[in-house]
Structures are given as structure tokens and as C-alpha cells.
Amino acid sequence: MTEQTQPTREAVLAAASEIVQAFADTDGERYFATFAPEATFVFHTEHERLADRATYERLWASWVDGGWHVVSCTSSDQLVQSFPGGAVFSHSVDTTVETGQGTESYRERETIVFRADPATDGTAPRLVAVHEHLSPMPDAA
């Protein structure tokens, strides 16, 4: 049995930053490359769980075809919880998008679950996202 490496905080933050930046750039190719093909997605704006990356890619393409693009996306209040073989990253995210019908802004909480895939070239394992969950940020009390 192979011992699983526990990702460092810095590695998780770098992987999460890659996802956030690709999203902020509306760069679907870069964004989806950070997710495993079997990744699942739970978004409060969708009626059902997206069961794999391909399903989300089709949804993303329909948004873009309708004029959707990201105007800004900022991450804050970041938390990394590493464990052997992966990590959970959670943060607050402020996003503004152009929808084709106007501009919308959201303040949400997001959780991304990473799996450490073994490197084939002797370098550190690659962190790949296997689940993403977005929920609305409650109004301040």
C-alpha cells in the first residue's frame, strides 16, 4: 500500500487560486482543467447536482453563448484543511458577472475538495478538484 501525502497549505492555496483566477478570467479551458472528469458540483442556483465535469462544461458553454462572463471574483476568509491524500478548501467569494441581460453580484461561501493525484515525473502530487459547492452568504444579523 502506498502512503498518501498530505498536501501543504501553500499547495492547496495555489491550487485554489488557480481555480479562482481561471474563473475570474472566464477561461473555461483553464478552469475545467483543474477538475477531475468525475468531479461533482452543487450550486444553490441550480436545481440539481451536476454529476460530472462534462455536465458543468455544457452548462458553462450555454451561459457564455448567452453573453455571460465574469467581471470580477475575489476570494477572502480562506481556510485549508489538509488530510492524507487531499484537502478541503473553503472561502468567501464575491463575484460580479455580466449575464447578457445585465450585471449581477453575489456573495457566497464556497467549498472545494481536492484529491492529491500522484505525479508521474517525480514532482509533488497534483491537486485536482473533485467537488465544488457554493451556497449563498446569509445576510448580516
Image: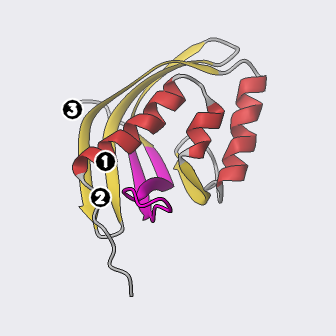
Q: Which residue is mark 2?
A: 7
Q: CA distance from mark 3 to mark 2?
A: 36 Å
- The residue located at (50%, 24%) in the rendering is 24
Query: 21 or 100: which is nearer to us?
Result: 21
Q: Which residue is mark 3?
A: 141
The quadrant of the picture occupied by the C terminus is top left
| Amino acid tagged 3 | Ala
Sequence-wise first label, 3 or 2: 2
- The residue located at (48%, 50%) in the rendering is 132
Crowd tier of the residue under label 3, counting other residues whose Cα lies within 10 Å: few below 14, some 14–19, many 20 or above:
few
- Image coordinates of residue 76 in percent, x first then y, are 27, 31
Crowd tier of the residue under label 2, counting other residues whose Cα lies within 10 Å: few below 14, some 14–19, many 20 or above:
many
- Image coordinates of residue 44 in percent, x first then y, are 52, 44
- Give, as a single range, the part of the protein colored magenta: 109-134
Mark 1: which secondary structure?
helix
User: Farthest top residue?
Assistant: 102
- Would you say the residues marked 1 and 2 are in contact, meaning their CB atoms lie under 8 Å apart? yes
Sequence-wise first label, 3 or 1: 1
**Is 92 included in the stretch rendered in magenta?**
no
- Image coordinates of residue 95 in percent, x first then y, are 45, 24
| Amino acid tagged 2 | Pro
Residue 11: image tag: 1
